[in-house]
Amino acid sequence: MKTIAIGSFFVLFAIATGMIASPAFADHPTATVSTPEGTSVPGCEKTNECYIPYEVTVDVGGEVTWTNDDTAAHTVTGGSATDGPSGAFDSSLFMAGTTFTHKFEEAGTYPYFCMVHPWMEGIVIVQEAGAEEDKHMDEDKHMEDKEVHMEGAASATGMLSDGTTVSVWASEPAAGERMEISIVFEDSEHVNHDIMVTQNGETVLDDTDAHHHEGKGVHETAPLSSSDPVDITVTFQGYGIDEKTGPIGEEVVFSNVVPEFGTIAMMILGVAIVSIIAVTAKSRVIPRL
Ligand SMILES: [Cu+2]
């Protein structure tokens, strides 16, 4: 019971913060839905393709436009065939080749259907502007939950022109495995950045607009095709949530990144490490092995 109460408090808190953070984020101002050809006979409902896409999301104040790409006339009517029209919106009959647009002013989930062909159903989800940002923050939290793996020395370290140290801790690259890259912007908060990782010229990670509240987070590559070292390019995109400051656009490039080595590996690879240092030193990386 108590957990439920705490849980709902957090939901309220999330909604409240979402509202405060809202105005700048209108990620989904508009959406378009097609009424494809052939929907005037049943069948499209089996794959939810009577309106395509079946479900769209817009922010409060966003508009959805339906295009009738069929040869028959249809309607876009809020509600459902079982419960009847909700009154939320109604195109009335709209003809082949025409469009219907409705502006959604209130958050909520709006099912709709076609009055002529009741098997035709779709959904519009209207979210508070800024909900996307909350989602983003949740993802970010998730990333931080995944625990930034930064024991031992960093795999590589670089610096932004404002003096902020950027360090990465990388897991060992192995064919068929994902590589985990923890990144830390020292003593920084609300860091936005892009990160691109390539291995032998092939892009294995391309995250844009990552946001790390505490200046650190974890990124994961696609499964690698070899155990060769990777190149990591971090493009700094500013400090802040709304207004971005700092040396935006600066790139920190780590070439030939090798992960930290375990003690056993260290002994076996003693000779190899020396040569790796030689290689990385040439490519502007400061490895601390
Ligand atoms: Cu119809």
Image (cartoon, rainbow, N blue to C red):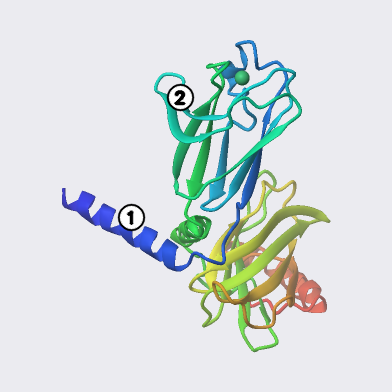
Query: Nearest the camera: 54 or 94?
Result: 94
Residue of label 1: 11
Front of the two marks 1 and 2: 2
Side of 85 relative to 252 (left or right): left
At 21% from the left and 53% from the top, the residue drawn is: 5
Q: Is residue 289 visible?
A: no
Query: Nearest the camera: 85 or 4?
Result: 85
At 60% from the left and 51% from the top, the residue drawn is: 28
Q: Which residue lies furthest to the front in this view?
A: 92
Residue 242 falls in which quadrant of the image?
A: bottom right
240 in relation to 3, above or below: below
User: What amino acid type is highlighted by mark number 2?
Assistant: Ser
Name the mark on residue 28.
none
At 63% from the left and 48% from the top, the residue drawn is: 30
User: What amino acid type is highlighted by mark number 1?
Assistant: Val
Q: Can residue 55 be seen in this view?
A: yes
150 in relation to 70, above or below: below
Query: Nearest the camera: 284 or 267?
Result: 284
- Residue 27 screen position, x and y as percent: 60, 56
Could you tell me which secondary element the residue under label 1 belongs to? helix
- Residue 123 screen position, x and y as percent: 52, 33
Q: Residues within 10 Å of mark 1 (few under 14, many from 20)?
A: few
Q: Ligand 1 lies in which image quarter?
A: top right
Residue of label 2: 80
1 in relation to 257, above or below: above
Cα gap from disc 1 to disc 2, whole angstroms: 29 Å
- Residue 155 screen position, x and y as percent: 63, 70
Side of 74 relative to 227 (left or right): left
- Residue 272 screen position, x and y as percent: 73, 66
At 70% from the left and 56% from the top, the residue drawn is: 206
